[in-house]
Image (tube, helix red, strand yellow):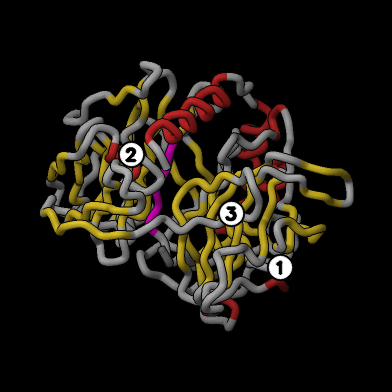
Amino acid sequence: MSDHRLRDLLEDRVAEIATADLVDGAWERAHAVRRRRAAVTASVVVAAVVGTTGVVVGTNGGHDPAPPAGSPTSTSTSPSPEVHSGPKAHRAGSYGGADVWWAPAPAQEWELPPLTGTPLPPVVDLSPGRPAWPGGMAAVGIVQLWGDDPGRVVVIGSDGASYTLDTSRLDPVADGGGNQRPPVTQASLAPDGLHAFFVQERSLEVYDVVAGSWASIPTARWAAEGASWDSDGLIEVPVLTSDAGRKRLFSASGEDRGTTLDPTRTIVLADGDDPYGRASWGSGGWWAGSLYLAGPLETDDGTYRSIDAVAVVDGTLSGRPFAADMVLAMRPWSGDDARWKQCCPVLGWADNRTVLFESRWAGAAILAWRIGTPYVYRVSDIGGWTPGEESFVASFAVAGR
């Protein structure tokens, strides 16, 4: 993706945020649900450890309690549909040869049953005044707030707590229109949670999360915007020439490891579809990514265009193009219930059939979808920020890549 396109996408996001209304009612609902959920959380075992593969599904408030620790369900590697008592996705139509499932409405996300046992905490706390990042452990997430300008950077440790990271060494980064953009991207955190990179106009600044040290990697102007981590823990930086797909490789400490020809593989189902975020391979051979679908998509209550979706490909089928087998589509909503543009970047996998993704709106959360089924779960509430005044960009290190 070109630097011009990336900056255009950022402007789209900021434009979307600037018109968002304050959603007092939704925020009050969030607090009510969190209070109900707090009572349930005490009855389940939360394995908030990097690399955890066991997944536990607890019921939401007012329903049967979660099974005790040590029961077959509590040690299962897959969420159990028997305890899913909340809103569900429904199957309707197809798009580009893929089966379409329609996600629950944003306002229904408060009532989704919780999914625990992932490395992610039940609440991602972005509020100001967090203690300084202590180092000495891996991170499961790194998030940057911004309003008119990029704001604080929050690190979510493998202990589930939130910390503030001092990024005073970083320079402001302006886009082509003179607006500032955050140096954190959705690809910033390494899959193992041990390093994170920050985009600068002519460099990548790489932070050793455990040791608390920095390294600097000089780049061509704007090339850092397209940086990503590969499966070997190296940073790929696009070479901005006519040689499409060629990338320069760097270690996390800044050592130049040469170049590689690694064209970006994306899921596109129809003309006009626009992939975003980073794709994630699951341990079961599935591959997931996020798309802005051009449409049209037919369903039981009308025709939709220009919507977001999580698309999933069966990567075990050799020799086939990267055409999705199924998508979880996000029906358009308005007002308090409107998801943002590029609402739903894929984060990774809870297990080999359950994909994790963000739902970005005033009641932001991390959700999970048991692919090919109606079952959607709530993994983490994202709180401590002010909808209508602030937005955020996040990068997470969870199972899969």
The residues tagged by marks 3 and 1 sit, at their Cα atoms, a distance apart of 22 Å
Q: Is residue 12 magenta?
A: no
Which quadrant of the figure has residue 67?
bottom right
In the rendering, at what x and y percent does residue 209 appear? Answer: 22, 51
The residues tagged by marks 1 and 2 sit, at their Cα atoms, a distance apart of 35 Å
Q: Which residues are magenta?
A: 393-397
Which quadrant of the figure has residue 336?
top right
Residue 258 drawn above or below residue 333: below
User: On the image, numbered disc 1 is attached to which residue?
Assistant: 373
Packing grade of label 2 (10 A; few <14, some 14-19, many >=20) is: many
Image quadrant occupied by the C terminus: bottom left
Q: What residue is drawn where x is 67% and y is 37%?
A: 29
Reading the chain from its start, which is encountered first: label 1 or label 2? 2
Reading the chain from its start, which is encountered first: label 3 or label 1? 3
In the rendering, at what x and y percent does residue 59 appear? Answer: 67, 62
User: On the image, numbered disc 3 is attached to which residue?
Assistant: 268
Q: What residue is drawn where x is 62% and y is 63%?
A: 324
- Identity of the amino acid at label 2? Glu
Q: Horizontally, is 6 left or right of 232 in the view?
A: right
Magenta stretch secondary structure, dominant: strand
Residue 39, can we see it?
Answer: no
State the mark number for residue 225.
2
Reading the chain from its start, which is encountered first: label 3 or label 2? 2
Q: What residue is drawn where x is 60% and y is 58%?
A: 311
Residue 141, can we see it?
Answer: yes
